[in-house]
Amino acid sequence: MSTFRRRTRVLTCLAAVSAVGLLPACAASQDQAAAKGQAGSKEIDVAYSQPLNTLDPIRADQNQTNTIDDTVYDTLLAYDTDSKLVPSVAKEFTLAKDARSITLTLRDDVKFHDGSTLTADDVQYTLDRYKRVGQGIASALGVYKSTTIKDPTHLTINLTEPNSRFVSWLSKFYLLDKKLLTSNAGNDDGQTWLHSHDAGSGPFAIDQGKDPVKVTRFDKYWQYDASRPTAIVFKQIAESPTKRDELKAGNLDVALTLQAPDAKALETADGVKVDYLNVPNTAYMFMNAAQGPTANPVVRKALALAYNYSAGLSEIRAGKGKIENGPLPQTMSCLVDSPQFSQNLDQAKSLLQQAGISNLKLVLRFQPSITDMVRESTLFQSDLRKIGVDLQLQPIAFPDYLSSLSSVKTIPELTLVQDTAPSPDAGVYLAKSYDSQAIGTTNRAGYKNAKVDALLTQADATSDENARCELYKQIQTQINTDVPAIDMYTLSAPVAYRSDLTGIVASQTVYPVSLRGVRVG
């Protein structure tokens, strides 16, 4: 343990002694904390930001659930550090030429936490159960038709229509123990039980389901590694400065979703390391492209030209990222070949004048708990003032924002969003955000363009990766023309952690890091 951390705990303890005179208890508490936080400790404490609603894997679309469930469950496929789709529980997989089915061969040595063997029957149950419940990650199951089982390790996933993107989602569907969950199904398909229990086969099993969540190492895991932590304790700490201070004090081992100033402050902290991970995470301002002032493409183009991208990235986000050139995160393949976006106030003002638009008043919604977003909101407000646009700032809680997407009538004029791609597949991200069929769910602009829809359909029916990539580039070009969002920058995600930990690397499916890869020592 570092001298700094020891001193912090001693001073805290002495303050408690002065207040209540409990020296023996305080000394014991100090010793326990020292043993817990010292370099080489095999149990680690991890802090995330948003409230945890459930551990049910169907809500893996929520980052806090996904971060924990990734340690507890397995998936059929996975992405490696080069963003290549690779085998996991499925050791072989093939997308049919017509993109209407995927055949898979499973490993035969995968054990659930209750000791039973994972088979094709569990895969079928998992997909069917997600579709029945119809929430969260189930939104990706729209084209799922059925699972045909040949034997315990061979199966085919059948789709209702061609969809080359579906294979990417097999890295996101956490596999469930049919026998265990069926016996705990209750009257809601196991949703209540899975709030605080698990039915997984991952490297850790849930030991304590809430306040905080604790997972312990599963010693019968098919990829068992004794250098994994013996346990991980997940704590919700909303405030970034608090996470910073707790990590400095030795009360945390890993701090996720730090704001830029706090990550910077930890770069010189004793016993702490900070890495900036290249993840598919982008800051946007989505505009309502269906109604109101921002339904006018001239207005949207002028707003996009007004934002000071370079100042936002360098001064607010500490330069940790890359300015966008289109709708996709810059970490992805199939990026359109176009220049980075930049501010041009004269052109923005000219566009509005030529269109006869004056005295424009708009409202930007933002999340006040995220300091960086607050600063970006005020920066944009200042930028728009220079072209004669009055921008009012209104806070919004993220769950309320998600609810607003249910209708184009309630989508805000402008909303500042930091969004992580569910996978590094370009088609998955483009369809999620810009397919007109996703209006009312994940299409955050209410954006509709028949050409984009047709190109997405064509790409879905194309099993050849290179051909699909060319179609995705055409889609990006059209979206850039329509400007349904101000694409700001892809952000490197800061992760601060105890310096003797290893395996902190960018994940393409769990923002920003998969903790199943962390090793101690």
Image (cartoon, helix red, strand yellow):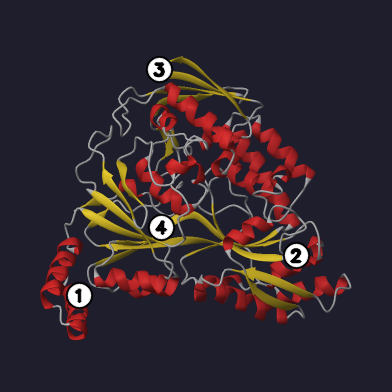
Q: CA distance from mark 1 to mark 3?
A: 54 Å
Q: CA distance from mark 2 to mark 3?
A: 55 Å
Q: Toward the viewer: 302 or 124?
A: 124
Task: Tell me if label 1 and label 4 are in contact, CB under 8 Å.
Answer: no
Q: Is residue 274 left or right of residue 342?
A: left
Name above or below for residue 280 compared with residue 305. Answer: above
Q: Earlier in the sequence, mark 1 or mark 4?
A: 1
Give coordinates of residue 174: x percent, y percent: 44, 37
The dot on residue 9 is 1
- Farthest right residue in view: 356
The furthest residue to the front: 187
Q: Are marks 1 and 3 in contact (CB under 8 Å)?
A: no
Q: Which secondary structure lies at badge 1?
A: helix
Amino acid under label 2? Lys
**Extreme residue in the top direction:** 150
Residue that mark 3 sits on: 152
Instruction: Answer with mark 1 or mark 2, whichever residue precedes in sequence.
Output: 1
Question: Measured along the vertical axis of the image, is residue 486 above or below residue 84?
Answer: below
**Which callout, 1 or 3, points at the residue further toward the start of the chain?**
1
The quarter holding residue 345 reads bottom right
In this image, 75 relative to 33: left or right?
right
Q: Position of residue 358 (x, y in %)?
A: 85, 77
Crowd around label 3: few <14 · some 14–19 · many ≥20 (10 Å): some
At 42% across and 75% down in the image, what residue appears?
A: 261
Residue at mark 2 to residue at mark 4: CA–CA distance = 31 Å
Type of the residue with mark 3: Pro
Dot label at residue 277: 4
Disc 2 marks which residue?
Answer: 301
Task: Please tell me whether residue 370 is drawn above or below residue 56 in the rendered image.
Answer: below
Residue 428: percent from left, percent from top: 59, 42
Q: Secondary structure at mark 2?
A: helix
